[in-house]
Image (cartoon, rainbow, N blue to C red):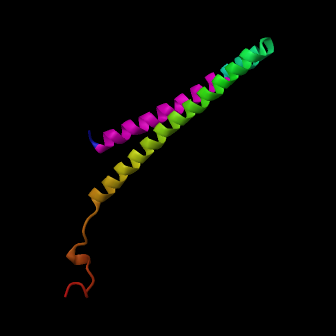
Amino acid sequence: MLPLDRRAELEGWIVASRRLQVRLGIALTLAMAGAFALMLYDGTLGKIAAAMVVVTAICAYWVTGSHILDWRHQLEALAQAQRKATRTTPSASTASPDQSR
């Protein structure tokens, strides 16, 4: 796979994961509202449901955030490899007079 293809793929995954985080935020906010409503009906079940929503939210953010961080590190590694590949050695014409002797 070419570095540019890999870069585009990683950037696509980052965008998709950010989108997933937003969707999860919306869904888990609605789930928490349901858990609070359940608390009014049955306090124990509502508290259990709220705890489950909180644990799910933490785990979901942790996993997606870790993936995004890993992909950013991979992007940086690709950029570093490209910088190393494009480095050129100084030519004799750009050497200072002291170096050309």
Outermost residue to the front: 44
Residue plotted at (25% across, 88% down): 98
Q: Is residue 3 left or right of residue 43?
A: left
Residue 15 visible (yes or no): yes
Towards the viewer: 63 or 81:
63
In the figure, residue 72 lies in which quadrant?
top left
Residue 35 percent location from the top left of the image: 71, 18
Residue plotted at (54% across, 36% down): 62
Magenta stretch: helix, strand or loop mostly: helix
Residue 5 located within the stretch drawn in magenta: yes
Residue 37 located within the stretch drawn in magenta: no
Q: How many marks are shown on the rendered structure? A: 0
Residue 33 visible (yes or no): no
Location of residue 89 with respect to 32 vertically, above or below: below
Residue 7 percent location from the top left of the image: 36, 42
Residue plotted at (75% across, 19% down): 36
In the figure, residue 30 lies in which quadrant?
top right
Q: Is residue 72 left or right of residue 88?
A: right
Outermost residue to the right: 40
Residue plotted at (55% across, 30% down): 60
Give the quarter of the figure containing the N terminus. top left
In the figure, residue 97 lies in which quadrant?
bottom left
Location of residue 81 with respect to 12 vertically, above or below: below
Q: Which residues lie in the magenta part?
A: 3-29
Towards the viewer: 90 or 10:
10
Towards the viewer: 61 or 44:
44
